[in-house]
Image (cartoon, rainbow, N blue to C red):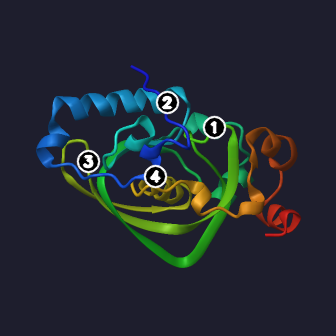
C-alpha cells in the first residue's frame, strides 16, 4: 500500500518524534508500516523515507539506494558524491555521531516532502549510527559519503528538521533547473557560480 507523503508546512515535519519500545517494533502494526513505507519510498522513487514524512511521529526510517538509481550518473559524478548502492534496511531509535575528521561534503540534496526543489547542503562525510533494526536488534552503522548523507537527512526528520534548515540559501532551486543548468558541473564549479 502506498502512503501519502506529507509536504513541507505540515506540523508533523517540525515536531520531535518518539522512540519505540522493542515490543512496539516487533508489533504487526509497525511491521506493516515498514512494508508500506518501503513501497512508498520505492514508488517515489527515493533513497530514504522517515516515518514523519508519512504523518507518523516516531523514530523510524527506511533506507535503500539502488544501483539502478545511479544509471544516469557518470563514474566521475559517483566518485565526487562518494555514492555506492545501499541495500534496503530500517533504522529505529537512532543516535548519530558526526565524524568530521575529513571535513564536510557538499552537494545538492532533495526531499520527498519538498517535491520539486533541491539545494546544496553541507553534511559530515562520515557518521556512526547506533540504532535498532526491524526486529529490535541493536545495530551499529559506520557510513561514509552519500550513505552518510542519507542517514543524516533521515535522522534530521526525526528531530523536526528538513534540509532547508542546513542548506546554503543561495543554492535553493528547482530540480528541473539543476538538470538544465548544473547537472554536468562539479561542486567546486557550482560553489563558484553561486558565490557560496
Pointer 3 with pointer 2, Cβ within 8 A: no
Pick the residue in front: 155 or 78: 155
Mark 1 is surrounded, within 10 Å at the Cα level, by few (under 14), some (14 to 19) or many (20 or more) other residues, namely: some
Q: CA distance from mark 3 to mark 2?
A: 19 Å
Of the two numbered discs 3 and 4 on the same chain, state the one appearing first in sequence.
4
Foreground tag (2 vs 1):
1
Foreground tag (2 vs 4):
4
- In the shown orientation, is residue 80 left or right of residue 20? right
Foreground tag (3 vs 4):
4
Assign a secondary structure to mark 1. loop
Q: CA distance from mark 1 to mark 4?
A: 17 Å
Of the two numbered discs 3 and 2 on the same chain, state the one appearing first in sequence.
2
On the image, the x and y values in percent for residue 111 come to 58, 44
Name the residue carrying label 2: 42
Assign a secondary structure to mark 2. helix
Mark 3 is surrounded, within 10 Å at the Cα level, by few (under 14), some (14 to 19) or many (20 or more) other residues, namely: many
Of the two numbered discs 1 and 4 on the same chain, state the one appearing first in sequence.
4
Name the residue carrying label 4: 14
Say which residue appears at 80% left-offset and 66% top-offset: 191
Of the two numbered discs 1 and 3 on the same chain, state the one appearing first in sequence.
1
On the image, the x and y values in percent for residue 7 come to 54, 38
Say which residue appears at 38% left-offset and 41% top-offset: 51
Assign a secondary structure to mark 3. loop
Location of the N terminus by quadrant is: top left
Name the residue carrying label 1: 115
Q: CA distance from mark 1 to mark 3?
A: 28 Å
Foreground tag (1 vs 3):
1
Rendered image: mark on residue 133 = 3
- The answer to whether one can see residue 62 in this image is no
On the image, the x and y values in percent for residue 185 come to 83, 55
Q: CA distance from mark 2 to mark 4?
A: 24 Å
Amino acid at each position: 500500500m502506498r502512503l501519502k507523503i506529507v509536504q513541507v508546512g505540515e506540523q508533523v515535519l517540525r515536531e520531535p518524534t518518539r522512540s519505540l519500545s522493542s515490543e512496539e517494533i516487533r508489533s504487526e502494526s509497525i511491521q506493516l508500516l515498514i512494508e508500506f513505507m518501503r513501497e512508498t519510498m520505492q514508488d517515489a522513487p527515493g533513497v530514504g523515507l522517515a516515518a514523519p514524512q508519512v504523518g507518523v511521529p516516531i523514530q523510524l526510517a527506511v533506507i535503500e539506494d539502488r544501483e539502478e538509481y545511479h544509471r544516469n550518473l557518470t563514474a566521475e559524478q559517483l566518485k565526487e558524491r562518494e555514492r555506492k548502492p545501499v541495500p534496503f534496511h530500517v533504522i529505529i531509535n537512532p543516535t548519530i555521531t558526526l565524524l568530521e575528521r575529513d571535513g564536510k561534503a557538499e552537494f545538492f540534496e532533495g526531499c520527498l516532502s519538498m517535491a520539486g526543489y533541491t539545494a546544496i547542503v553541507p553534511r559530515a562525510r562520515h557518521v556512526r549510527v547506533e540504532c535498532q533494526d526491524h526486529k529490535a536488534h541493536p545495530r551499529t552503522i559506520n557510513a561514509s559519503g552519500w550513505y552518510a548523507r542519507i542517514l543524516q537527512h533521515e535522522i534530521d526528520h526525526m528531530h523536526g528538521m528538513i534540509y532547508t534548515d542546513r542548506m546554503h540559501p543561495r543554492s535553493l532551486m528547482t530540480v528541473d533547473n539543476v538538470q538544465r543548468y548544473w547537472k554536468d558541473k562539479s561542486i567546486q564549479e557550482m560553489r563558484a557560480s553561486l558565490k557560496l
